[in-house]
Amino acid sequence: MNGTNDPIRPAADDPHGTGTGPERGTGNGAGDSNGGGTFAPQEAASILGDASLKAQRRFEQNPPLLHLIRAVVVLVAFGGLWFSVRNQHPYNGPNPAAIVVCYVAVAVAIAATAGAMRKANAGITRKDKRAQKIAAVVIGTAWIAAYVFNGALEAYGASHAIVYGIYPATAPLMIVGLVAAAWSGAREEWRTFAATLAVAIVAMLSAYGGPRDSWLFMGIGVAAVMAGAAVATAWEQRSAVVTRRA
């Protein structure tokens, strides 16, 4: 235990135990033949750079302003639908004018989202593009399936309160929200996961508002989720900028 290879005492040519002697390697982990887990500075810089690029791309895909646009769109669309049915007795469903306003608002949201996606997708890998296409197909299929199912309800005699009220007001966003939450959770995109899961929960609870007020509850609830996402994104961006400066 007192020889030159004593594992407790430093080697003779390394009196301070720094691990820089010829028998210990350089101590920085780069080229460590003993399998040390430390990264070389170049490797660490590359990993941090890739992580920063991915974070920046996520911010560009869903910037705070886009979340706020979505919040306004939801309020206008669902608010107009609720306004058209609020005094209906018996309930018949939204009128054509309100439906047109809803579609116009949705078109604005789609255009804004597409613009942000084009900017964020510049230079992304083929694998990421393929993943985005898969997500679009799955979420689009879920959205279409929700309305196809609604057609079956109408065909077999469900009431107007269900076919033109509770179901179209809540079920599509509940289904799509759950699908999107599962997808983003699998990819560890936790901010998107939280927002989409919250939308699904809002839709589930709004169904208890009945055929008229479910439209109102959806508008307020989903808009609040989008506004919260805008605040969270802005805060995360600010924190990232402060961290980089530090």
Image (cartoon, grey):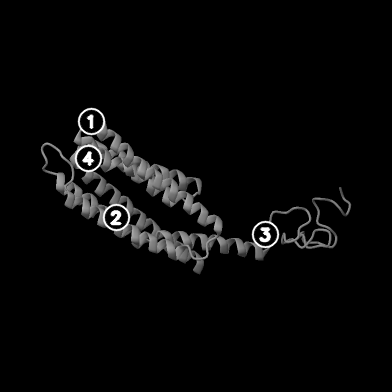
Kindly give the residue lying farthest to the front in the view shown: 155
Q: How far apart are the alpha carbons under marks 3 and 2?
A: 48 Å
Q: Is residue 156 left or right of residue 27?
A: left
Q: Earlier in the sequence, mark 1 or mark 4?
A: 1
Q: Which residue is mark 1?
A: 157
Q: Left or right: 126 with respect to 120?
A: right
Tell me the residue that label 4 is attached to: 164
Foreground: 122 or 182? 122
Which tag is nearer the camera, tag 3 or tag 4? 4
Q: Amino acid at mark 2?
A: Val
Instruction: For marks 3 and 2, give the one nearer the viewer.
Output: 2
Q: Which residue is mark 2?
A: 106
Task: List x then y, in percent, for residue 40.
Answer: 68, 62
Q: In percent of the image, x 89 and y 52: which residue is there?
A: 3
Asked if residue 28 lies left or right of residue 124, the reply is right
CA distance separating discs 2 and 1: 29 Å
Q: Amino acid at mark 4?
A: Tyr
Of circles 2 and 1, which is in front?
1
In the rendered view, tell whether residue 52 sits above or below residue 217. below
Q: Which residue ends up furthest to the bottom in the rendered image?
A: 245
Q: Is label 3 in contact with label 2 (beta carbons under 8 Å)?
A: no
Q: Which residue is mark 3?
A: 39
